Image (cartoon, helix red, strand yellow):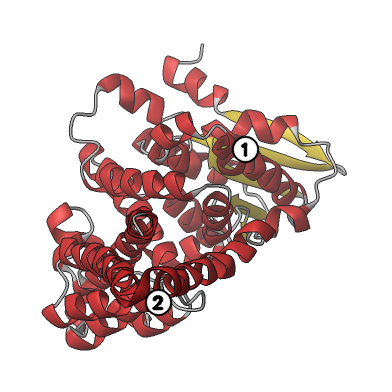
Amino acid sequence: METPDAQRAQRNITRLQVDNREVVMVGTAHVSRESAELVRSVIEAEAPDTVCIELCPSRYGAIRQQDQWQDMDIIKVIKEKKAFLLLSNLLLAAFQRRIAKKLGVKPGEEMIRAMEAADEIGAHIHLADRDIRITLLRTWRSMGLWGKIKLLFQLIYSAAGGIDDISEADIERMKQEDILQMLLADVEKSFPSLKTILIDERDRYLAHRIRTAPGEKIVAVVGAGHVPGITRHWEEEIDMAALETVPPKGRLGGWLKWIIPLAIVSLFAFGFFYGGRETGARMITWWVAANGILAGLGAIAALGHPLTILSSVVAAPLTSLNPMIAAGWVSGLVEAFSRKPKVRDFETLYEDILSVRGFWRNKVTRILLVVVFTNLGSGVGSFVAVPLMLKVFGGV
């Protein structure tokens, strides 16, 4: 007679067929040592040709190469406009590491065990998940300004301090949910469409990648929350190109980034023409003050260098009128040159992101915070400045 543990283990194993090949799918909990042990035992017992794991190349590299951060060029990250993407990755890693530390397991231990077991038997490792950067970008592009602000603060809250009061019920729920879904649970309530991107799309992606993996026998290690969706989409024809495409910015958004600066410059011109020099000057003053002060406050919130704060104040009123550059990129570069990250900052990055203080102390993450917070302050400053300028113009 099977023990309760054995019965529970069997419930986490799903067997599927594709073209006379067998797929043994192991549904795991990302925060469970029991799942990690189950993964190893299944791979050893099944001796598959291929082990599919729910990782993308970037997350796989992060596990295989623990020192990869030392090779990161933070200046290149800023210039390529990837600061928010990198910060999101770090916040996601922080969230998972804090949960794992609280429960006494390694982050992604079940995937580590899968890779170790595959190496030991000489099985091919097949990466089955969509690139985390594509998932985050598709999420970002699906949201408006308020949604993006809420997303940013939810990421910071969840990663840095949102699990201190975790309950046993929460732990059990975590064992059945996707890590991204857990992290963005509160945001998802306001934006139900996120579930499509975070879970449904990845269910289809995983189904296709596992189904087309090489080998006669395949063991697939995926989060338990994905198993029903993968099974449901197993026989479907899936358009992978559509799932891997980052949607372009909306046409309206593309026009607005030029129309809004042009409208603001036109407003200045109307102010000078109809109200005279004093009215035009007051309108410009409000624009400079709102943009500069709020961008500066963003840099201060990130504990930027004095030169960084000054650069954000000076740059924001100008960059807000230039669709090709943002205040955060300027202040981020100034911060990077003023407080150049040292080798130690990259070596301690994974430990520093486990606390709020560490995010602000580490020079790498502080640069990213400077970029994001300065851009946020400048964006809010533009919204604040326009009604103030209209009020001045209306008083003519």
Q: Residue at x 18, y 79 (%)?
A: 310
The residue that disc 2 covers is 319
**Relative to 5, 300 lies left or right:** left
Nearer to us in this view, 232 or 323 = 323
Q: Position of residue 296 (x, y in %)?
A: 21, 68
Q: Nearer the viewer, mark 1 or mark 2?
A: 2
Q: Residue at x 58, y 66 (%)?
A: 259
Q: Position of residue 346 (x, y in %)?
A: 25, 75
For residue 105, say whether it is visible. Answer: no
Res 280 quadrant in image: bottom left
Nearer to us in this view, 142 or 321 = 321
Say above or below: 349 vs 230: below
Considering only order in the chain, which callout, 2 or 1, is on the residue closer to the N terminus?
1
Say what amino acid the circle numbered 1 marks.
Thr
Nearer to us in this view, 108 or 42 = 108
Res 334 quadrant in image: bottom left
What is the CA distance from the residue labelled 1 to the residue labelled 2?
A: 35 Å
Q: Position of residue 386 (x, y in %)?
A: 39, 58
Say above or below: 370 vs 214: below
For residue 336, say whether it is visible. Answer: yes
Specify the label residue 196 is tagged with. 1
The residue tagged with tag 2: helix, strand or loop?
Answer: helix
Task: Categorize mark 1 by other alpha carbons within 10 Å: few (<14), some (14-19), many (20+).
Answer: few
Q: Position of residue 161 (x, y in %)?
A: 20, 42
Say what amino acid the circle numbered 2 marks.
Thr
**Relative to 373, 13 lies left or right:** right
For the C terminus, the quadrant is bottom left
Specify the label residue 105 is tagged with. none
Say above or below: 161 vs 264: above
